[in-house]
């Protein structure tokens, strides 16, 4: 039998793809094979009795299609599809669930001053895929919790989804908390609403300031992670940031608020906050536990919060990102007027929201507006002092008005809005459905996100790899700083040495770079470059070689 090769025209593809896809789904069997193997799929062509076409797939590249030479003119209508979704074996990069992963927990990425003037230690969990690919995208995730509660473990579900697709993923803790109102007649009962008497901000400035502090922490974490994952500031890299609810507000601010002129007025120095009402709780989460903290008179100060990039981990890497994932998040109302979304460097955006969300409005309003107004069980509504915000629906509408918007994808699920005339029944419905404030069908959301960002990260990572593994290099186990703690001089004690010189950097407790130079290490004790004028305290020492980076804490007495 003779064979010929044929590829259909684009017009013919569009005309017959639906019917052939449906026919394939009805008449075929699905195969799973390991990479590098071949599989034959058999499917019936619509409108052709007793005729079958065969296609050979190579799982690493598309193969040549050999079709029996037709005996009848109707065979000219056979459509050989190169990318039917049901048939496609080769997956787009970073979309297929295929890797196991490992996680390092409670890594310290810095310290920062919280709203009470106290120092918070900031930690993250790092998920690394068991992949031989040295060019991985980085995803940084931020949990929700009204900028008061929650913890990094809340995003573990998404970490595993994306790490199994080849992403290096971090989920971070950040500074939480804000000052409370000085008088609330009848605050929500914490026995009914856990933490309910924590939900009354002093004013709308407090929420904006909480978002800003969290954004600064996220940017510090991104710089810290870039230094760990990527070999140098000039290397090819692809970085995404994402979050849920309050964390999505931080993620959007991290990706969009990048110019000094965009800094909110609320984040400059402000008059002291009022003394919180005696019937309110000054609580926020530490280590995932909602705890109450005393407020001294000095703790009510509201100083300038510093630059939009923050001052954490100023290590030569910037905090720019290439994409933002917003699960039921939004932006303060001033973001549009301040042009946060203007400029050629605006990242790609994925926006998920249920249209009847009862916590963060889909379009425009105040957080908690629905529940606070209608489902408060007689308590004083708590949303009055929250700022007006734009939800993901309004954000998509704004993007649609721009002459050259960034790439964006909406994933909006329609649901019935709250009907105030039926408030009692509607509150029950919202209670039974998580206030429509959750990611419905998590695996499907992860699949859509991976598909949307695949071309973005693939393009950015194209070319020779320029990353180092997030695992410590092999030589790291044979090197340690000693003595530690030390008084005057710290040495790098080496039983094994890396091939070639290494870059040594010393950073202070906030992650600011103090010293960086290239040195060669030898077996035995190697004096570490040190400035005698540096004060006693905690420092970080980072060594970077051609095959990886390692970081130590050292303490000067």
Image (cartoon, helix red, strand yellow):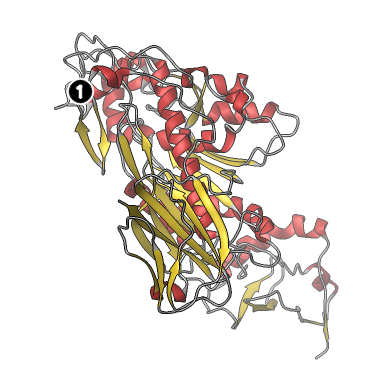
Q: Quadrant of residue 86?
A: bottom right
Going by the image, does 239 lie left or right of 425? Answer: right
Query: Alpha-carbon neighbours of circle 1 within 10 Å: few (<14), some, or many (≥20)?
Result: many
The residue under the point 28% across, 19% down is 298
Q: Quadrant of residue 394?
A: top right
Q: Residue reaching furthest left?
A: 191
Residue 245 appears anywhere in the view: no
Instruction: Point out residue 255 in the picture as x, y percentages from the top left corner.
Output: 57, 38
Going by the image, does 148 lie left or right of 314? Answer: left
The residue under the point 59% across, 45% down is 318
Instruction: Point out residue 268 in the picture as x, y percentages from the top left corner.
Output: 48, 19
Name the secondary structure under disc 1. Answer: loop
Instruction: Point out residue 292 in the picture as x, y percentages from the top left corner.
Output: 19, 29
Instruction: Point out residue 530 in the picture as x, y percentages from the top left corner.
Output: 46, 55
Quadrant of the image containing the N terminus: bottom right
Residue 41 appears anywhere in the view: yes
The residue under the point 64% across, 76% down is 60
List the residue tagged with mark 1: 281
Residue 450 or 510: which is nearer the viewer? 510
Residue 227 or 353: which is nearer the viewer? 227
Residue 367 or 142: which is nearer the viewer? 142
Residue 471 or 196: which is nearer the viewer? 471
Going by the image, does 242 lie left or right of 386? Answer: right
């Amino acid at each position: 039998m003779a064979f010929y090769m044929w590829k259909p025209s684009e017009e013919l593809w569009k005309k017959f793809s639906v019917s052939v896809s449906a026919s394939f789904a009805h008449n075929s069997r699905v195969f799973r094979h390991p990479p590098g193997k071949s599989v034959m799929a058999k499917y019936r062509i619509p409108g052709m009795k007793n005729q079958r076409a065969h296609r050979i797939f190579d799982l690493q590249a598309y193969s040549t299609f050999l079709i029996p030479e037709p005996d009848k003119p109707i065979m000219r209508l056979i459509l050989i599809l190169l990318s039917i979704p049901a048939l496609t074996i080769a997956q787009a990069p970073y979309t297929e669930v295929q890797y196991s992963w490992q996680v390092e927990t409670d890594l310290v990425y810095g310290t920062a001053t919280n709203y009470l003037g106290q120092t918070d230690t900031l930690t993250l969990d790092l998920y690394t895929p068991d992949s031989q690919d040295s060019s991985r995208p980085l995803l940084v995730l931020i949990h929700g919790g009204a900028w008061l509660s929650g913890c990094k473990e809340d995003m573990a579900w998404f970490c595993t989804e994306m790490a199994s697709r080849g992403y290096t993923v971090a989920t971070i803790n950040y500074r939480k908390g804000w000052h409370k109102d000085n008088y609330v007649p009848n605050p929500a009962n914490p026995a009914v609403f856990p933490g309910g008497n924590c939900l009354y901000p002093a004013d709308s400035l407090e929420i904006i300031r909480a978002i800003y502090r969290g954004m600064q922490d996220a940017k510090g974490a991104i710089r810290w992670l870039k230094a760990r994952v990527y070999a140098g500031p000039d290397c090819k890299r692809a970085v995404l940031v994402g979050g849920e609810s309050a964390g999505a507000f931080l993620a959007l601010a991290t990706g969009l608020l990048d110019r000094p002129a965009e800094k909110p007025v609320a984040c400059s120095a402000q008059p002291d906050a009022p003394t919180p009402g005696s019937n309110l709780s000054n609580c926020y989460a530490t280590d995932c536990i909602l705890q109450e903290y005393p407020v001294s008179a000095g703790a009510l100060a509201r100083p300038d919060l510093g630059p939009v990039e923050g001052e954490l981990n100023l290590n030569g890497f910037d905090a720019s990102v290439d994409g933002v994932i917003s699960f039921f998040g939004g932006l303060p109302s001033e973001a549009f007027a301040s042009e946060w979304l203007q400029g050629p460097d605006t990242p790609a955006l994925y926006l998920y929201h249920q249209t009847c969300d009862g916590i963060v409005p889909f379009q425009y309003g105040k957080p908690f507006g629905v529940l606070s107004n209608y489902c408060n069980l007689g308590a004083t509504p708590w949303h009055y002092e929250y700022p007006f915000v734009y939800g993901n629906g309004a954000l998509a509408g704004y993007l649609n008005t721009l002459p050259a918007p960034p790439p964006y994808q909406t994933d909006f699920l329609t649901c019935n809005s709250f009907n105030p005339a039926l408030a009692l029944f509607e509150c029950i419905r919202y209670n039974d459905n998580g206030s429509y404030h959750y990611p419905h069908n998590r695996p499907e959301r992860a699949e859509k996100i991976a598909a949307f960002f695949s071309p973005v990260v693939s393009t950015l990572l194209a070319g020779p790899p320029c990353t180092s593994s997030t695992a410590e290099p092999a030589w790291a186990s044979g090197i340690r700083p000693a003595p530690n703690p030390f008084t005057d001089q710290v040495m790098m004690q080496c039983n094994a040495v890396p091939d070639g010189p290494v870059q040594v950097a010393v950073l202070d407790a906030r992650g600011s770079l103090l010293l960086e130079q290239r040195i060669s290490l030898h077996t035995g004790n190697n004096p570490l470059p040190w400035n005698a004028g540096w004060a006693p305290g905690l420092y970080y020492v980072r060594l970077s070689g051609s095959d990886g980076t390692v970081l130590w804490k050292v303490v000067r007495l």
